[in-house]
Amino acid sequence: MSDSETVLLVGGGGREHAIARALTADPACDLYACASNRNPGIASLAARFETIAETAAADVVDYATDVDADLAVIGPESALEAGVADALDEAGVYTFGPNADAARIETDKAFQREFMDSASIPGCPDFAVFEDTAAACEYIDAYDGDLAVKPAGLTGGKGVKVIGDQVSPEEAKTYLREHDYDRVVLEERLVGEEFTVQAFVANGDVRPTPAIQDHKRAYEGDEGPNTGGMGSYSDAAPELPFMTAQDYADAVEILEATVEALPEYKGVLYGQFMLTADGPKVVEFNARFGDPEAMNTLPVLDTSLLDVLTAARDGASLPQLAFAGQATVCKYAVPDGYPTDPDSGAKIAVDEDSVDAAAAGSDGDALLFYASVDERSDGLYTTTSRSFAVVGIADSIAVAEQRAEDALAAAGDGLRVRHDVGKPELLQRRIDHMADLRGE
């Protein structure tokens, strides 16, 4: 590796702030960034930040050429779908992110399931793909059991409706008729506990990271509509409290089988799993870091992220990953009304001193990650998505949760939080749920 590497980061959310922080921890990284919103956390770490739409491939390439980027990292799935990785690679800028065709494992849920079926990837649920709404409704009527209803394309984590949990069969059919999607995937409802395992992938190597549980529901007690994720946690061990080491190993094996069937894949492969009574099943794959999951993973990654990227670019084996062996709890502050009717364009205040105070304790740390806020000359403003996240880091989930909760004093008026993420009561409910499913 040369003395320094010029890295272009595409994206302006909390995930990308976490990536920027991890990259710039290595003094050999010279970071440049671009996004449609000006993220103050990323801007403070980058040598230069340009306001460029993440999906504007030609403009991103022009910027990469202007700064003479050695490599690039793509944060959001929308940019992958738009072919930004393809355009950068074609311009000679190695991009840690799959091309648009490989990214279909996330951006096209019908392709995802058909690929899993044809490649005999373990953990695939029963499914059917429909282009005709009437036929899909007939399938719902005839199916013996509950179904997950998934539009085939990207929906920002908010398009899936689960019969028997969120909607009735009649409500599911009404949902399909009202939206009239081009294609929809209907698959068996998986019952258990969801978790995520993300892996760095390049040159045929798969380097997994610790398991994480995200909380999609908007309100405490797992109530309300799905969101992009209100918070998440990881444990000091690779697995979560409701999992066994074998459950984690089985999930990693699914990721490895997927990469074996996609040998040219590069970037992050994110497996969203349901731990059922019969082991892990695949809810979905994503072709990039999760948000909020990146904010759990990267702060405890002891291996240089820059070393991972340069090894990928140079065709070398990816380094074995080392982690701090600490738990993390991430909690998001979101605009009032999120996700159904977010208060966009509202001026907000974020008290960074509160996060510093939470981090000052000897029994843990706390970090602030800006997400979908827009920094203007007169301050910070909300967008239609999540505003910022705090992450507590400690030797146990309980202490990490307290550090995160302390740091939430940073949230001013006009923002809402799910305070129960990482709380002992919610964790115990997960553990009891899995014990019941397994008959323990």
Image (cartoon, grey):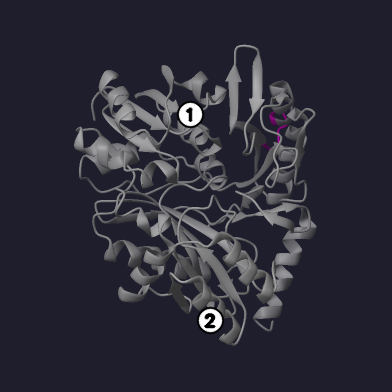
Horizontal and vertical percent for residue 432?
Answer: 73, 71
Horizontal and vertical percent for residue 354?
Answer: 74, 25
Quadrant of the image for the N terminus? Answer: top left
Q: Amino acid at mark 2?
A: Tyr
Q: Residue at x 34, y 44 (%)?
A: 97
Marks 2 and 1, how far apart at CA:
41 Å
Residue under label 1: 36
Give neighbour class at mark 2: few <14, some 14-19, many 20+ (Cα, 10 Å).
Answer: some
- Viewer-side residue, 331 vs 343: 343
Q: Which segment is the magenta one?
A: 359-364
Q: Residue at x 50, y 65 (%)?
A: 248
Residue 170 occupies which quadrant of the picture? bottom right
In the displayed structure, would residue 158 be above or below residue 48? below
Horizontal and vertical percent for residue 259?
Answer: 31, 61
Residue under label 2: 139
Give neighbour class at mark 1: few <14, some 14-19, many 20+ (Cα, 10 Å).
Answer: some
Q: Is residue 41 magenta?
A: no
Do callouts 2 and 1 mark residues in contact (Cβ within 8 Å)? no
> In the image, which disc is placed on residue 294?
none
Q: Amino acid at mark 1?
A: Ser
Predominant SS of the magenta segment: loop
Residue 378 makes an appearance in the image: yes
In the displayed structure, would residue 214 be above or below residue 354? below
Residue 123 makes an appearance in the image: no
